[in-house]
Image: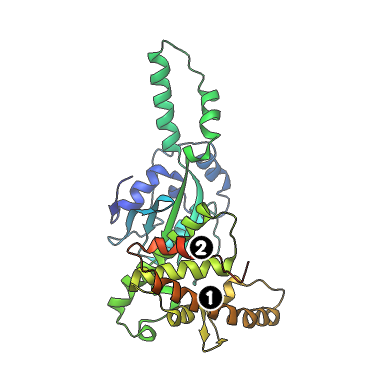
Amino acid sequence: MEELHGTEVLTRLAKVYQQLYIAPGRDKTSEYDDVVKRGHEISEGSLSHFTTSEKDSLVYEDTPAGKVCVITLYHRQDFVTFLQIMAGRCELTDIPDTQGASIIDGVANWEKIRAHKDDFYKEENAKGNPCPDWPAEFRRFTSDKKNYLDTLIVLSVGPYSGVSADRMGLSEDEWLPLSHTIRKHHECTHFICRRKYPDLKDAIWDELVADAVGIYAAFDHFDPQMEKIFLGIEGDHYTKGRLENYVEASSDSEKLVKIEEMTGKIIRVLEQFEKITSDNPCPDPYDIAIMLEESAFSPFA
Protein backbone atom coordinates (compact mmCIF):
# COMPACT_ATOMS: atom_id res chain seq x y z
CA MET A 1 0.00 0.00 0.00
CA GLU A 2 1.53 3.28 -1.09
CA GLU A 3 1.54 6.58 0.81
CA LEU A 4 -1.98 8.01 0.85
CA HIS A 5 -3.68 11.24 1.87
CA GLY A 6 -7.26 12.40 2.27
CA THR A 7 -10.45 10.38 1.99
CA GLU A 8 -8.62 7.69 0.00
CA VAL A 9 -6.91 6.51 3.20
CA LEU A 10 -9.88 4.70 4.74
CA THR A 11 -11.20 3.65 1.32
CA ARG A 12 -7.95 1.85 0.52
CA LEU A 13 -7.55 0.41 4.03
CA ALA A 14 -11.03 -1.07 3.88
CA LYS A 15 -10.17 -2.96 0.70
CA VAL A 16 -7.40 -4.72 2.63
CA TYR A 17 -9.03 -4.93 6.08
CA GLN A 18 -12.67 -5.42 5.17
CA GLN A 19 -13.84 -5.44 8.77
CA LEU A 20 -13.67 -1.65 8.45
CA TYR A 21 -16.94 -1.91 6.49
CA ILE A 22 -18.67 -3.21 9.64
CA ALA A 23 -20.02 -0.43 11.86
CA PRO A 24 -19.22 -1.22 15.52
CA GLY A 25 -22.21 -2.28 17.59
CA ARG A 26 -23.91 -5.19 19.31
CA ASP A 27 -23.95 -8.68 17.80
CA LYS A 28 -21.23 -7.98 15.24
CA THR A 29 -18.89 -10.78 16.37
CA SER A 30 -20.05 -13.35 13.81
CA GLU A 31 -19.78 -10.88 10.93
CA TYR A 32 -16.35 -9.77 12.14
CA ASP A 33 -15.13 -13.38 12.46
CA ASP A 34 -16.31 -14.20 8.93
CA VAL A 35 -14.10 -11.45 7.54
CA VAL A 36 -11.07 -11.67 9.83
CA LYS A 37 -10.85 -15.39 10.62
CA ARG A 38 -12.35 -16.90 7.46
CA GLY A 39 -11.42 -14.34 4.83
CA HIS A 40 -14.94 -13.73 3.58
CA GLU A 41 -15.15 -10.71 1.29
CA ILE A 42 -17.75 -7.95 1.54
CA SER A 43 -18.92 -7.23 -2.00
CA GLU A 44 -20.60 -3.89 -1.37
CA GLY A 45 -19.09 -2.27 1.70
CA SER A 46 -20.00 1.10 3.18
CA LEU A 47 -17.82 3.44 5.21
CA SER A 48 -20.70 5.73 6.20
CA HIS A 49 -19.81 5.24 9.89
CA PHE A 50 -16.60 7.24 9.23
CA THR A 51 -16.51 10.99 8.60
CA THR A 52 -13.09 10.94 6.83
CA SER A 53 -11.03 14.07 6.15
CA GLU A 54 -8.69 15.51 3.57
CA LYS A 55 -6.21 15.67 6.45
CA ASP A 56 -6.16 11.90 6.97
CA SER A 57 -2.88 10.23 5.99
CA LEU A 58 -1.14 6.89 5.64
CA VAL A 59 2.65 6.70 5.48
CA TYR A 60 5.31 4.06 5.99
CA GLU A 61 7.88 4.93 8.62
CA ASP A 62 11.38 3.48 8.34
CA THR A 63 12.64 2.28 11.72
CA PRO A 64 15.53 0.09 12.95
CA ALA A 65 12.94 -2.71 13.31
CA GLY A 66 11.63 -2.33 9.76
CA LYS A 67 8.91 -0.32 8.08
CA VAL A 68 5.61 0.21 9.83
CA CYS A 69 2.32 1.62 8.57
CA VAL A 70 1.32 4.85 10.35
CA ILE A 71 -2.27 6.04 9.91
CA THR A 72 -3.40 9.49 11.06
CA LEU A 73 -7.14 10.13 11.37
CA TYR A 74 -8.03 13.79 11.73
CA HIS A 75 -11.49 13.42 13.29
CA ARG A 76 -11.47 12.07 16.84
CA GLN A 77 -14.58 9.93 16.24
CA ASP A 78 -12.91 8.28 13.24
CA PHE A 79 -9.96 7.37 15.47
CA VAL A 80 -12.35 5.92 18.06
CA THR A 81 -14.37 3.98 15.45
CA PHE A 82 -11.18 2.62 13.87
CA LEU A 83 -9.96 1.27 17.23
CA GLN A 84 -13.36 -0.20 18.07
CA ILE A 85 -13.31 -2.13 14.81
CA MET A 86 -9.66 -3.10 14.48
CA ALA A 87 -8.71 -3.59 18.14
CA GLY A 88 -12.14 -4.11 19.72
CA ARG A 89 -13.56 -6.67 17.25
CA CYS A 90 -16.34 -4.30 16.13
CA GLU A 91 -17.64 -3.87 19.68
CA LEU A 92 -18.56 -0.48 21.12
CA THR A 93 -15.55 -0.52 23.43
CA ASP A 94 -14.72 2.54 25.50
CA ILE A 95 -11.74 4.50 24.18
CA PRO A 96 -10.49 6.90 26.89
CA ASP A 97 -10.23 10.57 25.94
CA THR A 98 -6.62 10.44 27.09
CA GLN A 99 -5.74 7.83 24.45
CA GLY A 100 -4.40 9.52 21.33
CA ALA A 101 -2.63 6.64 19.61
CA SER A 102 -2.43 2.88 19.43
CA ILE A 103 -0.33 0.06 18.01
CA ILE A 104 -2.50 -2.75 16.66
CA ASP A 105 -0.46 -5.94 16.28
CA GLY A 106 -1.45 -9.15 14.51
CA VAL A 107 -3.90 -7.74 11.94
CA ALA A 108 -4.79 -10.45 9.41
CA ASN A 109 -4.12 -9.31 5.83
CA TRP A 110 -6.19 -11.56 3.56
CA GLU A 111 -5.00 -9.60 0.55
CA LYS A 112 -1.54 -11.13 1.13
CA ILE A 113 -3.05 -14.61 1.50
CA ARG A 114 -5.10 -14.28 -1.68
CA ALA A 115 -2.08 -12.96 -3.60
CA HIS A 116 -0.02 -15.93 -2.41
CA LYS A 117 -2.82 -18.31 -3.42
CA ASP A 118 -2.80 -16.89 -6.97
CA ASP A 119 0.99 -17.24 -7.18
CA PHE A 120 0.83 -20.78 -5.78
CA TYR A 121 -1.70 -21.94 -8.39
CA LYS A 122 0.29 -20.34 -11.22
CA GLU A 123 3.53 -21.98 -10.07
CA GLU A 124 1.94 -25.40 -9.60
CA ASN A 125 0.13 -25.24 -12.95
CA ALA A 126 3.41 -24.28 -14.62
CA LYS A 127 4.90 -27.46 -13.12
CA GLY A 128 2.11 -29.48 -14.71
CA ASN A 129 0.14 -29.98 -11.50
CA PRO A 130 -3.56 -29.54 -12.35
CA CYS A 131 -4.78 -30.05 -8.75
CA PRO A 132 -2.59 -28.07 -6.33
CA ASP A 133 -3.15 -28.79 -2.63
CA TRP A 134 -4.07 -25.27 -1.49
CA PRO A 135 -5.29 -26.28 2.01
CA ALA A 136 -1.86 -27.75 2.78
CA GLU A 137 -0.10 -24.72 1.32
CA PHE A 138 -2.44 -22.40 3.27
CA ARG A 139 -1.43 -24.13 6.52
CA ARG A 140 2.25 -23.87 5.62
CA PHE A 141 2.00 -20.21 4.58
CA THR A 142 0.02 -19.07 7.63
CA SER A 143 2.24 -21.03 10.04
CA ASP A 144 4.67 -18.11 9.70
CA LYS A 145 2.80 -15.10 11.05
CA LYS A 146 5.14 -12.70 9.27
CA ASN A 147 3.61 -13.85 5.98
CA TYR A 148 0.18 -12.42 6.61
CA LEU A 149 -0.08 -10.49 9.90
CA ASP A 150 0.40 -6.72 9.85
CA THR A 151 1.12 -4.09 12.46
CA LEU A 152 -0.74 -0.78 12.23
CA ILE A 153 -0.04 2.39 14.16
CA VAL A 154 -3.03 4.71 14.30
CA LEU A 155 -2.79 8.30 15.53
CA SER A 156 -5.36 10.93 16.42
CA VAL A 157 -4.85 14.67 16.08
CA GLY A 158 -4.62 16.94 19.11
CA PRO A 159 -2.28 18.35 21.74
CA TYR A 160 0.14 15.72 22.98
CA SER A 161 -0.69 14.24 26.39
CA GLY A 162 -3.60 16.70 26.59
CA VAL A 163 -1.18 19.57 27.31
CA SER A 164 -2.37 22.90 25.92
CA ALA A 165 -0.36 25.07 23.55
CA ASP A 166 -0.42 27.89 26.13
CA ARG A 167 1.25 25.69 28.71
CA MET A 168 3.95 24.83 26.18
CA GLY A 169 4.45 28.52 25.36
CA LEU A 170 3.44 27.90 21.74
CA SER A 171 0.60 28.80 19.41
CA GLU A 172 -1.93 26.14 18.38
CA ASP A 173 -0.51 26.20 14.85
CA GLU A 174 2.94 25.43 16.25
CA TRP A 175 1.94 22.89 18.87
CA LEU A 176 -0.33 20.59 16.84
CA PRO A 177 2.28 19.52 14.24
CA LEU A 178 4.88 19.14 17.00
CA SER A 179 2.38 17.00 18.93
CA HIS A 180 1.94 14.82 15.86
CA THR A 181 5.71 14.39 15.55
CA ILE A 182 5.99 13.38 19.21
CA ARG A 183 3.03 11.01 18.97
CA LYS A 184 4.29 9.31 15.80
CA HIS A 185 7.83 8.81 17.10
CA HIS A 186 6.49 7.68 20.48
CA GLU A 187 4.43 4.88 18.93
CA CYS A 188 7.16 3.91 16.47
CA THR A 189 9.56 3.63 19.40
CA HIS A 190 7.21 1.13 21.03
CA PHE A 191 7.21 -0.78 17.73
CA ILE A 192 11.02 -0.82 17.69
CA CYS A 193 11.47 -1.82 21.32
CA ARG A 194 8.87 -4.59 21.27
CA ARG A 195 10.67 -6.23 18.37
CA LYS A 196 14.31 -5.60 19.22
CA TYR A 197 14.02 -5.92 23.01
CA PRO A 198 11.04 -8.24 23.66
CA ASP A 199 12.36 -9.29 27.07
CA LEU A 200 12.62 -5.72 28.39
CA LYS A 201 9.14 -4.92 29.57
CA ASP A 202 8.25 -2.20 32.04
CA ALA A 203 5.36 0.15 31.34
CA ILE A 204 6.87 3.29 32.87
CA TRP A 205 10.34 2.75 31.40
CA ASP A 206 8.76 2.11 27.97
CA GLU A 207 6.79 5.36 28.19
CA LEU A 208 9.82 7.38 29.26
CA VAL A 209 11.93 6.04 26.38
CA ALA A 210 9.14 6.57 23.84
CA ASP A 211 8.46 10.12 25.04
CA ALA A 212 12.17 10.92 25.00
CA VAL A 213 12.44 9.89 21.35
CA GLY A 214 9.30 11.86 20.47
CA ILE A 215 10.53 15.02 22.21
CA TYR A 216 13.96 14.66 20.60
CA ALA A 217 12.36 14.27 17.15
CA ALA A 218 10.17 17.34 17.60
CA PHE A 219 12.65 19.69 19.27
CA ASP A 220 16.11 18.29 18.32
CA HIS A 221 16.92 17.77 22.00
CA PHE A 222 15.44 16.09 25.04
CA ASP A 223 13.90 18.39 27.64
CA PRO A 224 13.22 16.65 31.00
CA GLN A 225 10.99 19.51 32.16
CA MET A 226 8.72 18.95 29.17
CA GLU A 227 8.46 15.26 29.98
CA LYS A 228 7.55 16.08 33.58
CA ILE A 229 4.68 18.20 32.28
CA PHE A 230 3.44 15.30 30.12
CA LEU A 231 3.52 12.91 33.07
CA GLY A 232 2.03 15.31 35.61
CA ILE A 233 5.09 15.99 37.76
CA GLU A 234 5.69 19.45 39.18
CA GLY A 235 8.93 20.03 41.02
CA ASP A 236 9.63 16.80 42.87
CA HIS A 237 6.01 15.70 43.27
CA TYR A 238 3.24 14.19 41.19
CA THR A 239 0.16 16.36 40.76
CA LYS A 240 -2.13 14.96 38.05
CA GLY A 241 -1.33 13.59 34.62
CA ARG A 242 -0.57 10.59 32.44
CA LEU A 243 1.72 8.82 34.87
CA GLU A 244 -1.12 7.23 36.83
CA ASN A 245 -2.21 5.34 33.70
CA TYR A 246 0.84 3.07 34.05
CA VAL A 247 0.67 2.29 37.76
CA GLU A 248 -1.39 -0.65 38.99
CA ALA A 249 -2.83 -0.66 42.49
CA SER A 250 -5.82 -2.01 44.37
CA SER A 251 -6.99 1.44 45.49
CA ASP A 252 -6.50 5.11 44.64
CA SER A 253 -4.63 5.71 47.89
CA GLU A 254 -2.24 2.84 47.19
CA LYS A 255 -1.72 4.14 43.66
CA LEU A 256 -0.78 7.60 44.92
CA VAL A 257 1.75 6.10 47.34
CA LYS A 258 3.32 4.08 44.53
CA ILE A 259 3.43 7.11 42.24
CA GLU A 260 5.16 9.24 44.88
CA GLU A 261 7.72 6.47 45.37
CA MET A 262 8.37 6.32 41.63
CA THR A 263 8.50 10.07 41.04
CA GLY A 264 12.02 10.44 42.45
CA LYS A 265 13.25 7.54 40.31
CA ILE A 266 11.63 9.04 37.22
CA ILE A 267 13.29 12.41 37.80
CA ARG A 268 16.69 10.71 38.04
CA VAL A 269 16.00 8.77 34.85
CA LEU A 270 15.08 11.96 33.02
CA GLU A 271 18.33 13.57 34.16
CA GLN A 272 20.23 10.56 32.79
CA PHE A 273 18.31 10.76 29.51
CA GLU A 274 19.24 14.42 29.15
CA LYS A 275 22.92 13.64 29.70
CA ILE A 276 22.95 10.68 27.30
CA THR A 277 21.17 12.53 24.51
CA SER A 278 23.28 15.68 24.98
CA ASP A 279 26.54 13.73 24.93
CA ASN A 280 25.49 11.60 21.95
CA PRO A 281 23.43 13.69 19.50
CA CYS A 282 21.85 11.61 16.74
CA PRO A 283 20.58 12.72 13.33
CA ASP A 284 18.01 9.90 13.43
CA PRO A 285 15.78 10.10 16.54
CA TYR A 286 15.24 6.34 16.47
CA ASP A 287 18.92 5.87 17.26
CA ILE A 288 18.06 7.49 20.58
CA ALA A 289 15.64 4.64 21.28
CA ILE A 290 18.41 2.08 20.76
CA MET A 291 20.85 4.10 22.85
CA LEU A 292 18.47 4.48 25.79
CA GLU A 293 17.34 0.84 25.74
CA GLU A 294 20.93 -0.34 25.72
CA SER A 295 21.97 2.07 28.49
CA ALA A 296 20.60 -0.60 30.86
CA PHE A 297 20.18 1.53 33.95
CA SER A 298 16.40 1.28 34.36
CA PRO A 299 15.47 1.46 38.06
CA PHE A 300 12.07 -0.06 37.32
CA ALA A 301 13.17 -3.48 36.06
Q: Position of residue 229 (x, y in %)?
A: 46, 82
Labels 1 and 2 touching (C-beta < 8 A): no
Dot 2 alpha-carbon crowd within 10 angstroms: few under 14, some 14 to 19, many 20 or more: some
Q: Residue at x 33, y 74 (%)?
A: 219
Residue found 51% across the figure and 31% down from its top: 141
User: Percent x, y for residue 295?
Assistant: 51, 65
Residue 181 placement (x, y as % from top left): 35, 67
Mark 2 highlights which residue? 293
The numbered mark at residue 269 is 1
Residue 73: name its quadrant. Answer: bottom left
At horizontal 42% and vertical 30% (from top left) the residue drawn is 116
Q: How is the image coloured?
A: rainbow
Tally of numbered discs: 2
Vertical position of residue 237 compared to residue 178: above or below: below
Q: Nearer the viewer, residue 289 or 251?
A: 289
Q: In this picture, is 258 found above or below 213?
A: below
Near-viewer residue (285 or 10) = 285
Residue 214 appears anywhere in the view:
yes
Describe the element under mark 1 as helix, strand or loop.
helix
Amino acid at pointer 1 = Val
Which quadrant: the N terminus? top left
Image coordinates of residue 164 in percent, x first then y, are 39, 81
